[in-house]
Image (cartoon, rainbow, N blue to C red):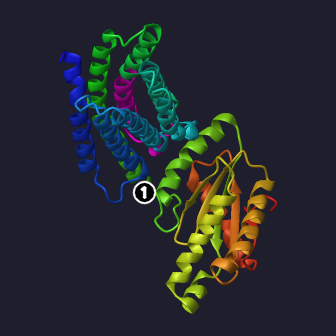
């Protein structure tokens, strides 16, 4: 047994150890989708390497079936790791391709088994293609740190360091085997070394990615209202600073709309606290569905919601108000068992405004006027037509 064969025989044991460590550290219950796919991917890679191990006795036709099944399981493991990356990174193209790769590899390898060299070349090319897709996923531009995690660059670098050498080794073996009449011994050592490196780096890479996702989720929850899922008041205020800065820098309009469901106190007295919580959650859901892309929405008080609208014309608040009333008219009777109305006030950014407080003060004055006028309507700040 040469050095390359010894390294290849160690791979199944190392992969099983990595899969067990990953499952132990991440846990099994309540694991997000990305972590679950990562666990499944490592377990499938370990099983595939076990089935591919040269330590198995050669049993003729059973050996062919075992190797084909092992390659299909390896391919399925790479597809599962890709699914984990698709959960941690921006939306990835190629979901159907990655899902179909294991079946295509199994069929192709089984049909070509009589020509073992051709079957091996096909397997190397398919696995290299999947690795290339994994590499491409990690090279795509990222999303915001809140969604993508706090250690993205670190674990992406580890992932690329793990996958690129193995990708090159598989392509080298496929090319040399395709150009020769028999297997080339020159390719086995680079493949064994790159596979060892991939397993060595895959575990910390997946752990860092999972930790980043967990930290990102905690950061998101820390600035989210638990009942409605919208930003809480503090997060809304912090994010508004950026919109104010952009509006002033580019001379663009900025409008704040304050909305408040009507008569929640009377509703609570009649039916209890639960109906109020349901009404607020329904109102928030409608507001999220009706806001424009780029607007900022949050729960700014116990029963109040705010929407900051960038590049908003005077008709913008009226359009939002109309969409909200139509959405509530459709959903409230079915989900609450009764109609739900609201009052709203809005104000537009003025040159002298120092921040959100100045704009909010005028919008709340307009909301008070809507209450005084009989509720169930939208009012603008003094000096603006509603």
Which quarter of the rendering shows the C terminus? bottom right
Farthest residue in the bottom direction?
270
Visible residue check, residue 284: yes
Residue 374, image x and y in percent?
A: 75, 80
- Residue 194 vertical placement versus 214 (above, below): above
Q: Which residue is located at x 24 percent, y 33 percent?
A: 56
Does the magenta run of residues contain 165?
no
Res 60 → quadrant: top left
Q: Residue at x 54, y 45 (%)?
A: 241
The residue shown at (47%, 32%) is: 110
The 10 Å Cα crowd at callout 1, few under 14, some 14 to 19, many 20 or more, is some
Question: What secondary structure is the magenta-colored segment mainly?
Answer: helix
Name the residue at the front extreme: 60
Q: Quadrant of the N terminus?
A: top left
Q: Position of residue 81 (x, y in %)?
A: 41, 39
Pointer 1 residue: 221
Residue sitting nearer the eye, 130 or 177 = 177
Residue at 41% from the left image edge and 13% from the top image edge: 172
The segment highlighted magenta reads 143-164
Q: Position of residue 52 (x, y in %)?
A: 31, 32
- Magenta stretch: residue 157 in it? yes
| Numbered disc 1: secondary structure | helix
Q: Nearer the viewer, residue 45 or 271?
A: 45
Left or right, 194 with reference to 109: left
Quarter where residue 59 is shown: top left
């Amino acid at each position: 047994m040469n050095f390359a064969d010894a390294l290849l025989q160690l791979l199944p044991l190392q992969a099983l150890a990595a899969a067990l460590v990953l499952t132990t550290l991440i846990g099994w219950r309540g694991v997000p989708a990305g972590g679950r796919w990562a666990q499944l991917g490592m377990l499938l890679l370990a099983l595939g390497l076990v089935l591919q191990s040269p330590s198995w006795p050669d049993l003729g036709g059973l050996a062919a079936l075992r190797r084909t099944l092992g390659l299909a399981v390896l391919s399925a493991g790479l597809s599962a790791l890709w699914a984990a990356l698709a959960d941690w990174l921006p939306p990835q193209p190629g979901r159907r391709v990655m899902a179909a790769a294991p079946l295509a590899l199994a069929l192709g390898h089984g049909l070509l088994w009589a020509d073992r060299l051709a079957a091996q070349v096909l397997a190397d090319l398919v696995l290299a293609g999947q690795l290339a897709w994994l590499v491409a996923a990690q090279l795509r531009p990222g999303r915001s740190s809140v969604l993508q995690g706090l250690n993205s660059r670190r674990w992406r670098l580890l992932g690329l360091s793990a996958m690129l050498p193995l990708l090159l080794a598989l392509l080298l073996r496929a090319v040399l085997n395709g150009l020769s009449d028999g297997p080339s011994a020159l390719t086995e050592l680079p493949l064994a070394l790159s596979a060892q490196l991939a397993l060595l780096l895959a575990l910390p890479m997946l752990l860092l990615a999972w930790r980043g996702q967990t930290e990102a989720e905690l950061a998101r929850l820390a600035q989210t209202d638990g009942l409605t899922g919208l930003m809480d008041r503090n997060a809304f205020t912090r994010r508004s600073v950026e919109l104010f800065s952009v509006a002033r820098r580019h001379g663009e309009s900025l409008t704040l709309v304050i909305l408040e469901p009507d008569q929640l106190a009377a509703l609570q007295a009649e039916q209890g606290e639960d109906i109020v919580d349901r009404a607020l959650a329904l109102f928030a859901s409608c507001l999220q569905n009706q806001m424009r892309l780029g607007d900022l929405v949050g729960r700014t008080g116990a029963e109040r919601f705010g929407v900051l609208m960038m590049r908003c014309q005077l008709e913008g608040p009226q359009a939002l108000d109309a969409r909200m009333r139509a959405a509530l008219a459709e959903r409230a009777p079915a989900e609450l068992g009764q109609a739900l109305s609201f009052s709203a006030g809005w104000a537009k950014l003025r040159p002298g405004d120092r921040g959100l407080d100045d704009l909010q003060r005028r919008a709340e004055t307009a909301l008070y006027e809507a209450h005084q006028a009989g509720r169930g309507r939208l009012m603008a700040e003094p000096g603006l037509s509603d």
